[in-house]
Amino acid sequence: MRRGFGRRELMAAAGVTLFVPAFLKRAFAEGEIRAPRLLLLMQACGTHQTSFWPDASSGSSPVLLPLTSDPALAQKVLFLKGIENKTQGLGNAHDRGFHSLWTGVAPVGTPEDSFGGGPSLDQTLKRLLAPRVPFPTLNVGVLAAYVAQKNGHRRSFSYYGSAQQIATQVDPYRVYAKLFPGAAASASPDAVARRLALRQSALDYAAQDLKDLSLRLGTDQRKKLDAHTTALREYEVRLAASLSGQAASCAPPAAPMAGLDVTLEDNVPLLTDLMLDLVALALSCNLTQIVTFQLGLCGHQWRYRWLGIDKDSHEEIAHQDTADGSNAPVADAMTRISRWACERVLRLAKNLDQMIETDGSVLDNSLLVWANENGTGFHNLDNLPIVLLGRARGQLRQTGLLDVGNQSHYQLNTSLLRLMGVPANGYGDQPNSGGVSGLGG
């Protein structure tokens, strides 16, 4: 039986003379987090339904093939079919699909600029669970775009309360500086940029102490310490590369010390990977417990040049899709867009699954929810593409495709609360909705 290892043993091995970075203390303090970790990732503009859902014979689809072809992860993924966002009221289907999916409350504001009418799931869980981590919730994403947002609400789906939107953090340098400040003198984003440009890690100022600590630990404990420090150093190398334009950015930085331009749409692939890798570090090091990740503005108009599409993915692609797939070029573009998003989800899941804890991997102890504001590109709010990854600390046991018929997003949120260890009878505007029939938790 694998032996547990927590903060007390880490500190006993370190003694009083060694300095251990705060994030490593958190990473070894597993006993303090008993509810699952949660990540809500939102995609925009719907999907092509016939290429998304797994078929009965192969258990896969053109969109989901990256996930279903990975033997380890295929045993930890559930495709939840039949969820409908039943919110009515202000805004179009993009608006309601975006800000009401996780609030479960009718929107407020004006028809042209509507906002969530209550707290979102992440903030509800923050209040109920009171996570004992440095950053109970983390709201991040990639919003780089050539086309400005249509409405003010489209920059975030996370809400403290009615119309109280939480800003999405979009700069990986600033998020890194917040999570891994290193020495106090290097805590600002500008100082972090200078340190990274000089190839200095947040771990450097504690390097000798960490080396001494490693010598005092047992084999399993040393492996975990090495895994965390290696992951951070590898991330810093990639983040530093983007400072000098060495990464795959489509535009040079404005100045030698300038970071990656977080407003430039062609930088979306690199920004997405950097942010998701940073989220994986934050979750595995117990720096945060609940994350919201926004993949583009609500109803975004990315052109997906990196996929060879180069068309307005909203007006020229999503809105032109058809249920029967008769517009083949559009169906193909929609499929490629969702598959690219699936590959990003796979990247995150694999990172979390490779980080081992005393009771499984970080992915086993997490619940990742990949969702979409729409079911299709033509403003449909039923049959939303919902994918659940991870085991939620043993609470989620189903895998493969679960077709629940026609059940509401109120029921989905209720089930997610239960999977997170929170007793719930309903959610939002439907306090007695019950959970999703057939979904454990």
Image (cartoon, helix red, strand yellow):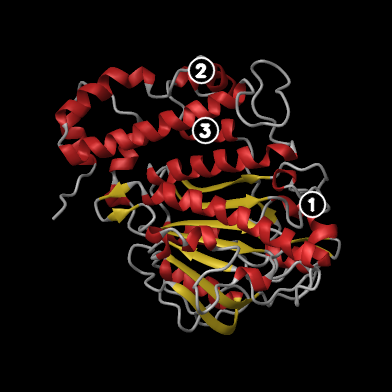
**Residue 225: image x %, image y %?**
28, 35
Label 2 vs label 1, nearer the camera? 1
Q: Residue at x 31, y 50 (%)?
A: 32
Left or right: 14 in relation to 73? left
In the foreground, 52 or 410: 52
**How far, Cα to Cα, is label 2 from label 3?**
12 Å
Nearest to N terminus: mark 1 or mark 3:
3
Q: Which residue is mark 1?
A: 301
Is residue 18 in sight in this rendering?
Answer: no
Circle 2 SS class: helix
Q: Is residue 182 above or below residue 425?
A: above
**Residue 265: image x %, image y %?**
74, 40
Label 1 vs label 3, nearer the camera? 1
Left or right: 380 in relation to 54? right
Q: Residues within 10 Å of mark 2 (few under 14, many from 20)?
A: some
Q: Residue at x 41, y 77 (%)?
A: 440
Q: Residue at x 63, y 31 (%)?
A: 248
Q: Which residue is mark 3?
A: 176
Q: Residues within 10 Å of mark 1 (few under 14, many from 20)?
A: many
Q: Residues within 10 Å of mark 3 (few under 14, many from 20)?
A: many
In the foreground, 48 or 186: 48
Instruction: Inspect the image, locate mark 2, and give the three-letter code of the amino acid beneath it.
Output: Arg
Tell me which corner region of the image, top left, top right, bottom left or bottom right, holds residue 319: bottom right
Instruction: Inspect the image, locate mark 3, and give the three-letter code of the amino acid beneath it.
Output: Tyr
Circle 1 SS class: loop
Nearest to N terminus: mark 2 or mark 3:
3
Instruction: Inspect the image, locate mark 1, and give the three-letter code of the amino acid beneath it.
Output: Gln
